[in-house]
Amino acid sequence: MPFDPREAVGARDSTPTRISCGSGGCDRRSTGDTASARPRGFLRAMDVVAADQELARAATLFPARELVKKIVAPILDEVGERWAHKEFGIAHEHLASGLLRSMLGSLFRLYPPSGNAETMVLATPAGERHEFGILLAALLGATHGWRVVYLGTDVPAADIAIAARLTNARVFALSLATWHQGIDEELAAISRLVPVSTRVWVGGAEASRYAELINRANWILVRDLEELEDRLGR
Ligand code: B12
């Protein structure tokens, strides 16, 4: 079904975030659906200014972990769904990606690591351009007190290894969202080049396809963000 702009404009009328106040102060939480409905609606209508304002507002209302679960993940899920049904194309995807990247990027500053924090390097391997898995993982890392070195997408094995060595990383986290030509060689190179003192954690929708390699290389398959949080807290 093609995208209907009236549906998006209707988002302006959707229930605003519920804020209830009692003697103990204000509870500014709302349901996941309600919380993400407005930015999702504005994105559908490509009202970038309103979407940005909604995201900025959400960032002041929710702690980072809640923000990831209640706002960012539902927006990305909707982009994914609509993309799959050809209701969204590159323009919607780029708009959503740009807005979320800049919001998440600014949140890192709120979680400066302590002097003795462990370091986590994050990247996707060469050829992998899906960024949001590592971006969400990076933000969770920061909220758990880790020093986060975010390299971004499409990073060759040799460069990942340099970063892991220079930062004395305890963990290198990577995301695999697609299978593509050359990825097996790239993963093999990562296992050769990354220092043995750095544990490799692998996540993403396609990660389980590599379970055998992950086992052989003594890496860890991290199934979802909940498991990641468990591991970050250890
Ligand atoms: C947005 C998007 C893009 C954007 C990415 C922009 C960006 N800045 O990231 C662009 C336009 C670049 C893109 C390109 C392509 N894409 Co694309 N894309 C998507 C889309 C719509 C959403 C992906 C996303 O961001 N999801 C939200 C994130 C948060 O979800 P996630 O990545 O799964 O991560 C979650 C978990 O997996 C986990 N996780 C992920 N990483 C990690 C890492 C760790 C350490 C941990 C603990 C957890 C974890 O946590 C997240 C939250 O739960 C999906 C469809 C979908 N429904 O997912 C297709 C999809 C992933 N793309 C697909 C394809 C085929 C492509 C292209 C080949 C298309 C093309 N023909 O050019 C290219 C490939 C580019 C490349 N070489 O990588 C396929 C992959 C199929 C496959 N299994 O191989 C999908 C599934 C679409 C489809 N149904 O066909 N894409």
Image (cartoon, rainbow, N blue to C red):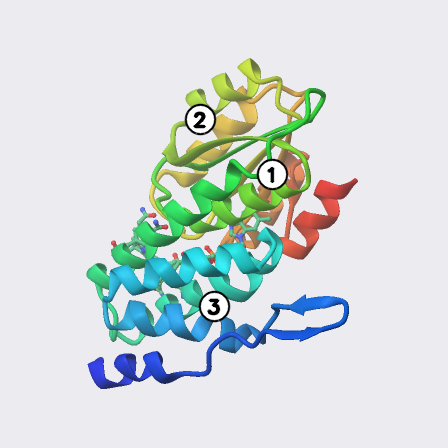
Return the x and y of residue 215 as percentages of the image width and height: 66, 41
Q: Secondary structure at mark 2?
A: helix
Q: CA distance from mark 1 to mark 3?
A: 21 Å
Q: Which tag is nearer the camera, tag 2 or tag 3?
A: 3
Left or right: residue 16 versus residue 211 is: left
Return the x and y of residue 65 as percentages of the image width and height: 61, 54
Q: Which residue is label 2 attached to?
A: 157
Mark 3 Cα shell of 10 Å, populated few (<14), some (14-19), many (≥20): some
Q: Are marks 1 and 3 in contact (CB under 8 Å)?
A: no
Q: Which residue is label 1 attached to?
A: 142
Which residue is at a point 41% across and 49% down the rendered structure image? 103
Nearer-the-camera pick, 188 or 5 = 5
Marks 2 and 3, the one that precedes in the sequence: 3
Q: CA distance from mark 2 to mark 1?
A: 24 Å
Marks 2 and 1, the one that precedes in the sequence: 1
Compared with 208, 128 (above or below) is: above
Q: Secondary structure at mark 3?
A: helix
Which residue is at a point 44% across and 26% down the rendered structure image? 157
